[in-house]
Amino acid sequence: MNITALLADLGVDYSTLAGQDIPARSPRDGSTIAVLRSHTASEVQQAIDNASQASLQWRNEPAPLRGELVRLLGQVLREKRDALGQLVTLESGKILSEGIGEVQEMIDICDFAVGLSRQLHGLTITSERPGHRMMETWHPLGVCGVITAFNFPVAVWAWNAALALVCGNAVIWKPSEKTPLTALAVHALLQQAIARHARQAAVPAALCQVLIGGAEVGVALSRSPAVALVSATGSVAMGRKVAVEVAQRLGRSLLELGGNNGMIVAPSADLDLALRAIVFSAVGTAGQRCTSLRRLFVERSKFDTLTAHIERVYATLNIGDPLAAGTLVGPLIDAHAYANMQAALSQARSEGGMVSGGERIAGLGGEHAFYVRPALVRMPQQSAVMHHETFAPILYALPYDDFSQAIALNNAVPQGLSSAIFTNDIREAELFMSANGSDCGLANVNIGTSGAEIGGAFGGEKETGGGRESGSDAWKTYMRRATNTINYSGALPLAQGVSFDIG
Ligand code: NAD
């Protein structure tokens, strides 16, 4: 893989950002692909000022014409889907079909947002006063800051930016310091889309900006009153800090934080289907998805059979170079992720867990790459280790005896992102999706916990942060709502029958 040629194909010129601060590494072999410099505090402030100006211009462009820019972005992404997918694989370590799939997800949200650009509609509401009408109108917020995690280095920006742009906002992106090159590549592709826009002058230069750097750049965005919305994706620890910074100035935040996702396998489940869903959800992206399956609750009579099947499949998984055809499991992002995985496994052992797998695969990718065999851990109960998200392919499994116990186990952790049930019993499925069922933002039936489509609102409850992005009516977070009351009567009746006669 010739990285220089790949970056050139995507139009990336990082010479102005070459520096000493931020090494872009490939987890595939631990090599350093490039070293970038962080944007300085004054550059960050300048970017915010420029974005504020840009938003004043962009908000006056009719929404369908804003959608035209997003349509062109989708077109450029279609043309460069495979190249960008390769770069995602190189920088994040996910397998190529997932890297390309992530770019497809960007294309999908662009299509969604283009349609949305003609549908940013409010309500009309009957008034209690004669000759009056009420309605809602939706207006752009201004500047949206988007902070993203390493594991979806491009799609999460697109979920936010495609909506934010059609809604009339300027966007500042702070990508993960672990994946800066993919962000620069997306930015370069966006410039190509802008260059194709028939009304180029309508697109201000600072409409979309990328700021390279670590937490300090995210902190600056969170603190700035000029950033109307901070959409932050990452760990719960990060979300706690961003939430406080933004709340301090009474700004708006959209938090997409860690998950700790569970699946119930009921006695009527199609075990073959469940097995496939479990393996994809637990080991896909090497267990580094926010929606990765981490906790499995199997009805006791099926427990031994199903866990034996999982163990058998785990032993034959093709683990290796994420760019190679046929690989199912690529590397962990870095040494830190590997150390966290091993710490969680030893904690699980100390809590009575029986660990199978989980070891580093010697020699694969060289000394600085971290390839592991996914771990299955049979647990005696849902103990402390299962209450944390360990961002690695560890699946904890335990048997349950009655269905209400299974739902209680599913809900007994602080996070609330994704959940699933495998059952052919409609009463169990409905109960799982009801108010008495799963307390997560995503509750699936007969599919796994990971692999959401863009059409639905995506996000989770409790420590996952409560944010929703992507489909459904998530666009409303990127706009402000005004309620308008219009009097066409010639009189001035007051609401609630209040009388105020000034003679
Ligand atoms: P992370 O929290 O380490 O970093 C995420 C981003 O936050 C990075 O850009 C980082 O620079 C920035 N950041 C860190 N501290 C900050 C601060 N104080 N203020 C502002 N920004 C700050 O997360 P990660 O390791 O890159 O990603 C893995 C985590 O992300 C997992 O917990 C995973 O579940 C979560 N995640 C959640 C979703 C979701 O939609 N819910 C999606 C993807 C990943």
Image (cartoon, rainbow, N blue to C red):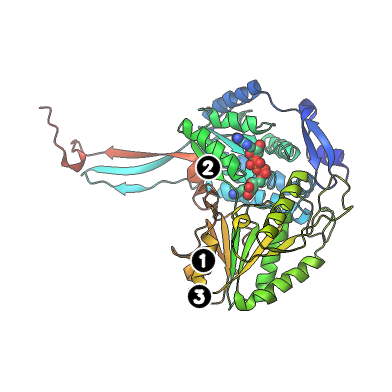
Q: Which of marks 2 and 3 is nearer the N terminus?
A: 2
Q: Position of residue 85 (x, y in %)?
A: 76, 49
Quadrant assignment, res 362 = bottom right
Q: In this view, does 176 lie above or below 429?
A: above
Q: Position of residue 263 (x, y in %)?
A: 60, 65
Residue type indicated by callout 2: Leu
The residue indicated by pointer 3 is 426
Residue at mark 3: C-beta within 8 A of ligand 1: no
- The answer to whether the residues at label 3 and label 1 have Cβ atoms under 8 Å apart is no
Q: Position of residue 151 (x, y in %)?
A: 69, 47
Q: In this view, does 17 lie to the left or right of 475?
A: right
For label 1, the crowd category at 10 Å Cα-Cα, with few meaning under 14, some 14 to 19 and many 20 or more, is: many
| Along the viewing direction, whichever of 222 and 456 lies nearer the viewer | 222
- The answer to whether the residues at label 2 and label 3 have Cβ atoms under 8 Å apart is no
Residue type indicated by callout 3: Ile
Residue type indicated by callout 1: Ile
- Tell which residue pokes out farthest to the top in this image: 42
Quadrant assignment, res 372 = bottom right
The label nearer to you, 2 versus 1, is 1
User: What element does badge 2 sit on?
Assistant: strand
Residue 76 visible somewhere in the drawing: yes
For label 3, the crowd category at 10 Å Cα-Cα, with few meaning under 14, some 14 to 19 and many 20 or more, is: few
Q: Which of marks 3 and 1 is nearer the N terminus?
A: 1
| Along the viewing direction, whichever of 436 and 166 lies nearer the viewer | 436
User: Marks 3 and 1, how far apart in space?
Assistant: 15 Å
The residue indicated by pointer 2 is 254
